[in-house]
Amino acid sequence: MPVPVDQPPYGRMPSGIRGLRLEATDVRAELKYAGHRSADHRADVDDRLVERGQGLDVTTARQQLRRPDRTGPWKT
């Protein structure tokens, strides 16, 4: 069934629709993974990620192992 664009309930909607196309020029991301856990727990998680080795597991574990200083001293 055709929808009349100039009658209710859709009469005013088409003029309110806008679209735009964006091009990503930069990405900034933050990885948070078990930061509230003890260092021993995080090391165990990293070991298990490497062992499983699916998707981004190894990359995630390497990132965590590369930055152990990013966790506050209260979490060691």
Image: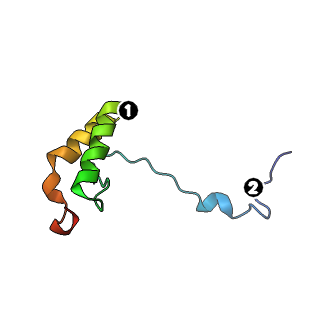
* Residue 40 tag number: none
**Nearest to viewer (mark 2 / mark 1):** 1
Q: Quadrant of the N terminus?
A: top right
- Percent coordinates x, y for residue 3 in the rendering: 80, 51
Tag 2 residue: 5
Q: Kindly indicate the quadrant of the structure image that contains residue 16.
A: bottom right
- Percent coordinates x, y for residue 8 in the rendering: 79, 64
* 30 to the left or right of 1: left
Please tell me whether residue 8 is drawn above or below residue 31 in the rendered image: below
Asked whether 37 or 60 is in front, the reply is: 37
Q: CA distance from mark 2 to mark 1?
A: 47 Å
For numbered disc 1, what is the local secondary structure?
A: loop
* 68 to the left or right of 23: left
Tag 1 residue: 55
Residue under the image location 32 percent in, 31 percent down: 51
Residue 67 appears in the picture as rendered: yes
